[in-house]
Every structure is written in C-alpha cells, then in structure tokens.
Image (cartoon, rainbow, N blue to C red):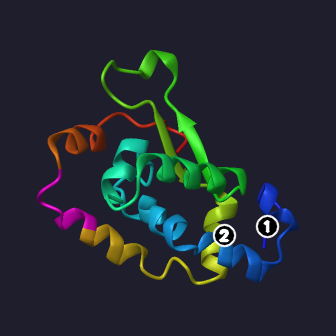
Amino acid sequence: MSTDLGTAEGMESPELVHFVTQQTRFALVTILQHPDQLPSMYELQELNPSVSEATVYKHIQKLVDAGILKEVALDDDQRRQGYPWKFYGLTEAGREFFEDHNLLAAEETLQRIYETISDKPEKMVEYENAPRPDDG
C-alpha cells in the first residue's frame, strides 16, 4: 500500500479497510458513480439522503485527512455564482488502496446506476453539469 495516505499511515491495512468501509464513509464513495468522479458536497448529500449534512461533511473530512479523498477547487476565474466550486475525489493513493483491497469491483455498476437516476432534483442536475477542475 502506498505511504501517501495522510493520518492513515499509522494504521495497519486491516484497520484502514475497516476505517474506509465504515457504513457512512463507504456510502460516500458514491464519488465513484459521479460522471466526473468529482461531486460537490451538495451532490454527496443528495446521494446520501439518510445522512445529515453535518455527518456527510464530517466523514468526507475524515477521508480527506486519511488521504483517501482530496478536495479540489476551481480557480477563482472559473467560478460561477450559484454553482459549486469545491469538489471531492479519490486521491491516487486512495484509488490504489481501493484497488489493492478489491473495493472498486462495483465501480462500473455504480456509474450505470447513477446514469439511470431519473428523479434528480433540478439543482443536482445543474451542479452535475457545473465546471470541474481540470486536475481532478
């Protein structure tokens, strides 16, 4: 496993697998089903309606701190009023960790399921089509 994982470095592999696959955190890996794999916080909240906004934020931050996820932002000149400018995606080390532990097996299926969601709120469709950072 790569040593690029932040505070997770001190964890042994089984501990890190348990940390990542904790129910709420693993549900947030819906990042994998997003068309650009860089959803905004709003999109993450919409895809996890049974979890409060504060809980989504807390678990995303834990995954960022562990080096599994990264936060990426649009440059100031790319930001548009009323649209998200901060997005979340897997780090290279996070993707490697998921691949090493066979946690990406459903990635393609998740993407197909996401494409079939027909009752997305209008705001989510707008956010889904919002500009994303190039280096995502």
Q: Where is residue 6 in the image (x, y as percent from the top left)?
A: 79, 54
User: Farthest right residue?
Assistant: 10
In which quadrant of the rendered view does residue 20 lie?
A: bottom right
> Which residue lies at the image location 17% right of the left edge and 52% below the top edge?
120
Q: Regarding mark 2 in the picture, which secondary structure is present there?
A: helix
In which quadrant of the rendered view does residue 108 lie?
A: bottom left
Q: What's under tag 1, amino acid-wise? A: Ser
* Magenta residue check for 119: yes
Q: What's under tag 2, amino acid-wise? A: Glu
Identify the magenta region.
114-120
Q: Which numbered circle lies on residue 43?
A: none
> Which residue lies at the image location 66% right of the left edge and 69% below the top edge?
96
User: How far is disc 2 from disc 1 in space, using C-alphas?
Assistant: 7 Å
Q: Do the residues labelled 2 and 1 touch (CB within 8 Å)?
A: yes
Q: Position of residue 123 (x, y in %)?
A: 21, 38
Q: Which residue is at the front of the view, 65 or 116? A: 65
Mark 2 vs mark 1: which is more N-terminal?
A: 1
Q: In this view, does 101 lie above or below 127?
A: below
Q: Regarding mark 1 in the picture, which secondary structure is present there?
A: loop
Instruction: Name the residue beneath numbered marker 2.
Output: 96
Give neighbour class at mark 2: few <14, some 14-19, many 20+ (Cα, 10 Å): some
Give neighbour class at mark 1: few <14, some 14-19, many 20+ (Cα, 10 Å): few
Q: Is residue 119 above or below residue 131?
A: below
Q: Position of residue 115 (x, y in %)?
A: 22, 63
Q: Which numbered circle lies on residue 2?
A: 1
